[in-house]
Amino acid sequence: ECTDNNSFIIIYNYYFKSLVLQNSTGFIRFNNESYFPVIIIDAGHGGEDGGTSTSDGVPESDINLQFAKKLEQIMAFCGFNIYMMRND
């Protein structure tokens, strides 16, 4: 459930090839893949700022990047144009 105007939920129906972006004020429906928005994924904490670390010493930046790359694969499989802010 969305609690503010800055967050949204992405609902993709693979069978009907439709996408809904929903936030607390309403939703936008895309029924044609050629009109799907570009998805930009920012894993954050790249470069010198690795963020915090786990107790095992794994930097937050590595965990964020793994998650972002998996999200990229899923969204690309669904036909979205994906741009990654960082890949390493």
Image: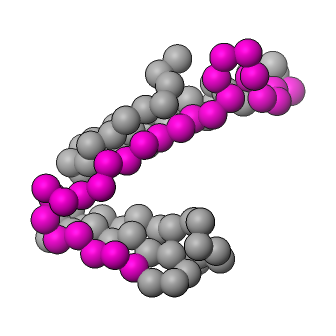
59 or 46: nearer the viewer: 46
Relative to 6, is 82 on the left or the right? Answer: left
Q: Is residue 39 above or below residue 23?
A: above
Relative to 68, is 52 on the left or the right? Answer: right
Residue numbers of the magenta segment: 27-55
Residue 61 x %, y %: 67, 27
Residue 37 x %, y %: 30, 55
> Within the magenta stretch, is there residue 31?
yes
Residue ID at (26%, 48%)? 80
Residue ID at (75%, 22%)? 49
Q: How is the protein colored in the picture? A: one colour
Q: Main secondary structure of the magenta part?
A: loop
Quarter of the figure that contains the N terminus: bottom right
Q: How many marks?
A: 0
Instruction: Answer yes or no: is residue 15 visible.
Output: no
Which residue in the rendered view is the most extreme toward the right? 55
> Within the magenta stretch, is there residue 70?
no
Residue ID at (34%, 75%)? 28
Q: Is residue 52 above or below residue 30?
A: above
Q: Quadrant of residue 71?
A: top left
Residue 74 x %, y %: 34, 45
Residue 66 x %, y %: 54, 30
Instruction: Answer yes or no: is residue 57 visible.
Output: yes
Q: Is residue 87 above or below residue 15?
A: above
